[in-house]
Each structure stands twice: as structure tokens, then as C-alpha cells.
């Protein structure tokens, strides 16, 4: 992947002439070490150019003067998920969620859960972006949301330690792992899954936030990020990413055992404690219906909203 980039600071000229320019975030992630510094350089130069172009103008006017036809109104574009990953592993890393969800089935947390982080493979071809409608599967009457965080890899590796895994993370996003609870409950009784109960939709976004942007929220090996879910504007769930039992580097390390992970792969945290209707109880909050809008908000990561449709 090559990029010919020229700029003249004195002349205020920025001329980007790509030979093979990545057209998707997945392609960018394949050479994250190259493209991230390049993107930051371009961003800095564009800001400098806008500042020099119209120092007396409002920021929006400066952007229009500099970028012109490259700018689009938010209501005229369709935003998909920030990345279309090759694989999607969703973990089960919050103890409170595990305890609450298993208690609903009359079960205790098994000792093995504390020994290593576990995950299942979900469907990377059903990812949705911010604002995209979520079609309720015709085979469920118990539709649920799950309030989660996800990271995407910008570097590959095999048999990596948690310390090494930290440097593999390109960025973080909000993740909503939509669930058909009646289907999931039945298939889990068979001893395999979840599968079809999670196969239809996962929302991701609204953007990818690089780790350096989250440094102000760091507490040791965790981030102090408040997590909230609302349904039709009513607060249902509240939690915090700092309460996660297994960290993202620990999850990545586990996933890499005997398997080479590649850039662009997606890692989900699993649901934060109280982060779904299953935990709260449908007697408190009913299962999601057509027309319901679910918004997940996480400090530093933004808000991700989707509406259920038939």
C-alpha cells in the first residue's frame, strides 16, 4: 500500500495523490502503523490550512472554504459500522452480568469462569452502523439489547501476552449485541451456543476511538467509562467499563493462544452488569418491540442509537 503525499507549509498547499489508497477502515487497519501517523498528519495539515484560510471565519465556514464539495450534511449520508471485520469474537468478561444472567436460570457462576476469559464467534456479516434499523427476527418474541464495548485490532500476533496485546489495539467502539432470548435459551439447553439467538444483528459505532484519546480515563489497566442504555429515552441500564473482570489485553491474549490474530479482527467485551433486559427482568422492562429506539452511550466513545423495525 503506497501513498504519495506532498505539502508545502509555506504555501499552505496540501496535495494528496494516492497510488493505492485504502478505501475501507479494514484496509487501513492492515497497515495501521503506516496509516495512523499519515491520517494524523493530514488532519493536522488540514486544520492548519483552514486556520490560515479564514482566521476570521467560523469553523464551519473555514471547513467549507477548504474542503468544499468534500463536505456532506449528516442527513445526506449513510453511516455504516466503523469497520467490517474478518472475525468477531464476543467475550463474557463482566462478573456481575454473568452472575445475574445465570441466577435467572437458577445457576451459580462456575469456578472455570474465573480461570480464563471465554468467548463465542458471532456473525461479522450482520453488523449495523449508527442509526440503522434493526429488523426483529420473525422467530423471536423476546428481543433484547446488550450494552457492550468493543476493540478492533491494528496489529496481529500469536500466543501474545497481555502486555503485548495492549499494543495490538487500534481503537474502541460501542457495541450492541442484539439477542433473541427465547431462541438463545433453547439452544443453550443443548449445550452449544449462543448461535442463532445472536445471528441476526450487532450494532457497532458510532466511530473508532484510538487508545490515546481514552488516556484521561485510564485507571491502572482499565478505563473509567460510564455506560448507559436507554429505551425510548428512559434509562434502563447503567454500568462502568472499569468493573470488567478480564481486560481487553487479557481477552486478546486468550484468543491468540495457538491462533494467529490478524489486524481488523473485532473483540467484544460482553455485557456490562445490568446491561440488558434479561438481567433487569422483563417484569421490570418488557422485551423490545417494533418502534423501540435503543441508545447506548459510553463516556469517550459517543452514543449509538438504533430503532427496531418489523
Image: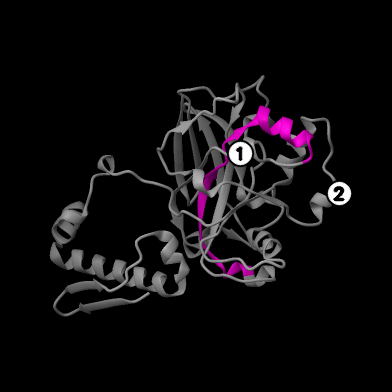
Disc sitting over residue 198 in the figure: 1
- At 54% across and 70% down in the image, what residue appears? 155
In the rendered image, residue 253, in percent from the top left (x then y), is placed at 68, 65
- At 72% across and 31% down in the image, what residue appears? 185
Q: Secondary structure at mark 2?
A: helix
Q: Secondary structure at mark 1?
A: helix
Which residues fall within the magenta stretch?
A: 165-191
Q: Circle 2 is placed at which residue position?
A: 111
- At 73% across and 30% down in the image, what residue appears? 186
Q: Quadrant of residue 250?
A: bottom right
In the rendered image, residue 60, in percent from the top left (x then y), is placed at 20, 52
Asked if the magenta segment contains residue 186, the reply would be: yes
Q: Residues within 10 Å of mark 1 (few under 14, many from 20)?
A: many
Residue placed most toward the observer, 292 or 44: 292
- At 63% across and 59% down in the image, what residue appears? 248
CA distance for labels 2 and 1: 25 Å
Q: Is residue 172 positioned above or below 31 on the image?
A: above
Of the two numbered discs 2 and 1 on the same chain, state the one appearing first in sequence. 2
Q: Is residue 297 positioned above or below 286 on the image?
A: below
Amino acid at each position: 500500500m503506497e501513498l504519495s503525499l506532498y505539502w508545502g507549509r509555506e504555501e499552505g498547499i496540501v496535495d494528496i495523490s494516492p497510488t493505492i489508497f485504502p478505501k475501507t477502515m479494514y484496509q487501513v487497519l492492515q497497515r495501521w502503523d503506516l496509516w495512523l501517523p499519515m491520517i494524523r498528519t493530514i488532519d493536522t495539515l488540514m486544520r492548519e490550512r483552514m486556520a490560515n484560510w479564514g482566521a476570521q471565519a467560523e469553523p464551519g465556514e473555514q471547513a467549507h472554504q477548504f474542503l468544499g464539495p468534500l463536505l456532506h450534511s449528516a442527513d445526506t449520508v449513510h453511516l455504516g459500522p466503523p469497520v467490517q471485520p474478518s472475525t468477531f469474537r464476543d467475550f463474557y468478561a463482566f462478573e456481575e452480568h454473568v452472575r445475574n444472567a445465570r441466577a435467572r436460570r437458577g445457576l451459580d457462576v462456575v469456578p472455570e469462569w474465573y480461570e480464563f476469559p471465554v468467548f463465542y464467534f458471532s456473525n461479522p456479516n450482520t453488523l449495523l452502523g449508527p442509526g440503522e434499523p434493526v429488523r426483529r427476527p420473525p422467530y423471536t418474541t423476546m428481543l433484547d439489547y446488550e450494552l457492550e464495548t468493543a476493540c478492533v485490532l491494528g496489529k496481529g500476533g500469536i500466543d501474545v501476552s497481555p502486555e503485548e496485546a495492549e499494543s495490538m489495539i487500534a481503537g474502541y467502539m460501542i457495541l450492541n449485541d442484539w439477542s433473541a432470548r427465547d431462541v438463545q435459551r433453547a439452544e443453550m439447553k443443548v449445550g452449544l451456543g449462543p448461535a442463532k439467538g445472536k445471528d441476526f444483528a450487532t450494532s457497532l459505532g458510532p466511530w473508532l476511538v484510538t487508545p490515546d484519546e481514552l488516556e484521561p480515563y485510564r485507571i491502572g489497566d482499565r478505563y473509567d467509562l460510564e455506560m448507559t442504555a436507554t429505551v425510548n429515552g428512559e434509562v434502563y441500564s447503567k454500568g462502568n467499563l472499569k468493573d470488567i473482570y478480564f481486560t481487553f489485553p487479557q481477552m486478546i491474549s486468550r484468543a491468540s493462544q495457538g491462533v494467529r490474530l490478524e489486524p481488523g479482527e473485532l473483540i467484544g467485551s460482553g455485557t456490562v452488569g445490568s446491561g440488558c433486559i434479561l438481567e433487569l427482568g422483563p417484569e421490570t422492562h418488557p422485551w423490545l418491540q417494533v418502534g423501540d429506539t435503543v441508545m447506548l452511550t459510553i463516556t469517550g466513545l459517543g452514543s449509538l442509537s438504533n430503532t427496531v423495525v418489523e
